[in-house]
């Protein structure tokens, strides 16, 4: 089972949803980067369950422990191990799911591949696995800030079902996004989104939507030609998150409606920098960042586990029914915002270090 990401900034996550704990080992972090558990906890608190009325009520503090790789508040250059212990796990809520496969979940496919699975909360397929990613990304964020001051990654809820926010990617701030529990950058639509989630939850159902993200202040030159194109690695990172079903960068699918003369981003000089008049490329051309804001969107499906009876099959390959139990998000998007930011920072950090290794620095 592949649990690794990155080439130079390499992470390996571990743990199951209802096991003793979850975490990550980070290898390749440069030395002398200021880092404390408080740096990681800020991001973990944004991801944790039970943080608002529109998230799962599972009560986890998600308190992190840095077990290795730091000394006197700085990284050593050696592997950094981070552990978050599970406290409020209730595996008994999933006992029926040990014999019946949840529709649209990973239960059947894990059994088909491995012949064994941890049915308690989904094991490795649970979004609880992303704790390790978010913790590692907090380290990646510190590395990015150290070598590339001014770079900033922000994500926000763009749509909840058919409710769409109006957000300016160049102007939105972290304070705007965190000002409401649904984490949309458009405060005027937040209450409508929140009420839709609460309505669907009261029905025992679930809904999905789209998260949009921007990277501002990214220098040109990050990314590799052909297979490790920056947008390709971002796509892989985003689609590795639970419940994701789509990724588009820049103009995305809407770009198919334009002609080349309409879609091309024309270059011009601004002081001593190469700029583009439009940004339909989404900040990436030829797989390499061009210095413009990197803009992309990620589609999340409705949460698979719902609180109503659905047709399914059992491990004995017999038709049966299953009603969801346990504690789940009716909409994953508010908690997925920090996950999208995390995966972005992991990819950017890895490509930043790769660029420095190959080219010896950052293009101004």
Image: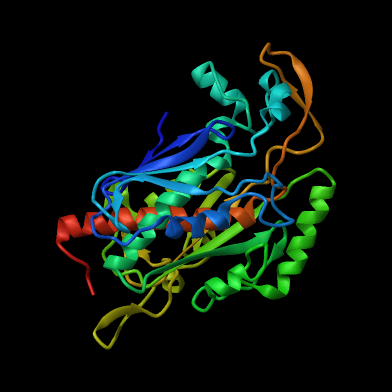
Q: Residue furthest bottom?
A: 271
Is residue 22 positioned above or below 166 on the image? above
Residue sitting nearer the eye, 195 or 14: 14
Residue 285 visible at all: no
Q: Residue at x 80, y 51 (%)?
A: 200
Residue sitting nearer the eye, 321 or 284: 321
User: Viewed as shown, does residue 237 lie left or right of 94?
Assistant: left
Is residue 129 positioned above or below 9 on the image? above
The quarter holding residue 79 reads top left
Instruction: Check the image and tell me how it is coloured.
Output: rainbow
User: Viewed as shown, does residue 127 lie left or right of 205?
Assistant: left
Q: Residue at x 37, y 55 (%)?
A: 139
Q: Position of residue 12 (x, y in %)?
A: 38, 39
Name the image quarter holding the C terminus: bottom left
Residue 41 visible at all: yes
Name the image quarter holding the N terminus: top left
Q: Position of residue 282 (x, y in %)?
A: 43, 66
Is residue 334 positioned above or below 270 on the image? above
Q: Position of residue 352 (x, y in %)?
A: 27, 59
Q: Position of residue 55 (x, y in %)?
A: 69, 52
User: Viewed as shown, does residue 270 lie left or right of 158?
Assistant: left
Q: Residue furthest front?
A: 72
Residue sitting nearer the eye, 204 or 62: 62
Q: Residue at x 28, y 52 (%)?
A: 29
Question: How many numbered markers are drawn?
Answer: 0
The quarter holding residue 211 reads bottom right
Q: Residue furthest top?
A: 316
Q: Residue at x 27, y 88 (%)?
A: 271
């Amino acid at each position: 089972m592949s649990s690794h990401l990155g080439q130079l900034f390499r992470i390996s996550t571990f743990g199951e949803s209802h096991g003793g704990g979850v975490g990550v080992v980070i290898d390749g972090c440069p030395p002398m980067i200021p880092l404390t558990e408080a740096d990681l906890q800020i991001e973990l608190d944004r991801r944790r369950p039970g943080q608002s009325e529109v998230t799962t009520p599972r009560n986890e503090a998600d308190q992190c422990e840095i077990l290795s790789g730091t000394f006197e508040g700085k990284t050593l250059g050696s592997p950094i191990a981070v552990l978050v212990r599970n406290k409020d796990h209730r595996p008994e809520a999933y006992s029926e799911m040990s014999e019946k496969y949840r529709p649209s979940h990973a239960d059947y496919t894990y059994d088909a591949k491995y012949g064994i699975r941890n049915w308690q909360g989904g094991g490795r397929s649970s979004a609880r696995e992303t704790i390790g990613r978010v913790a590692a990304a907090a380290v990646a964020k510190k590395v990015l800030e150290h070598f590339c001051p001014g770079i900033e990654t922000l994500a926000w809820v763009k749509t909840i079902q058919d409710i769409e926010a109006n957000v300016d990617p160049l102007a939105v701030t972290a304070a705007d996004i965190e000002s409401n529990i649904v984490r949309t950058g458009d405060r005027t639509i937040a209450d409508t989104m929140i009420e839709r989630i609460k309505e669907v939850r009261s029905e025992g159902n679930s809904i999905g939507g789209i998260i949009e993200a921007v990277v501002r202040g990214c220098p040109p030159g990050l990314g590799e030609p052909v297979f490790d194109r920056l947008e390709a690695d971002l796509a892989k990172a985003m689609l590795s998150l639970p419940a994701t079903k789509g990724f588009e960068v820049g103009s995305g699918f809407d770009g198919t409606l334009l002609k080349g003369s309409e879609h091309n981003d024309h270059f011009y000089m601004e002081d001593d920098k190469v700029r583009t008049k439009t940004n339909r490329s989404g900040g990436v051309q030829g797989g390499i960042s061009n210095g413009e804001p990197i803009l992309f969107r990620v589609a999340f499906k409705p949460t698979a586990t719902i609180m109503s009876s659905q047709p399914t099959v059992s491990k004995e390959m017999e038709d049966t029914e299953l009603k969801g139990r346990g504690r789940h998000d009716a909409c994953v998007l508010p908690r997925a915002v920090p996950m999208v930011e995390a995966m972005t920072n992991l990819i950017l950090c890895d490509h930043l270090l790769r660029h420095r290794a190959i080219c010896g620095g950052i293009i101004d």
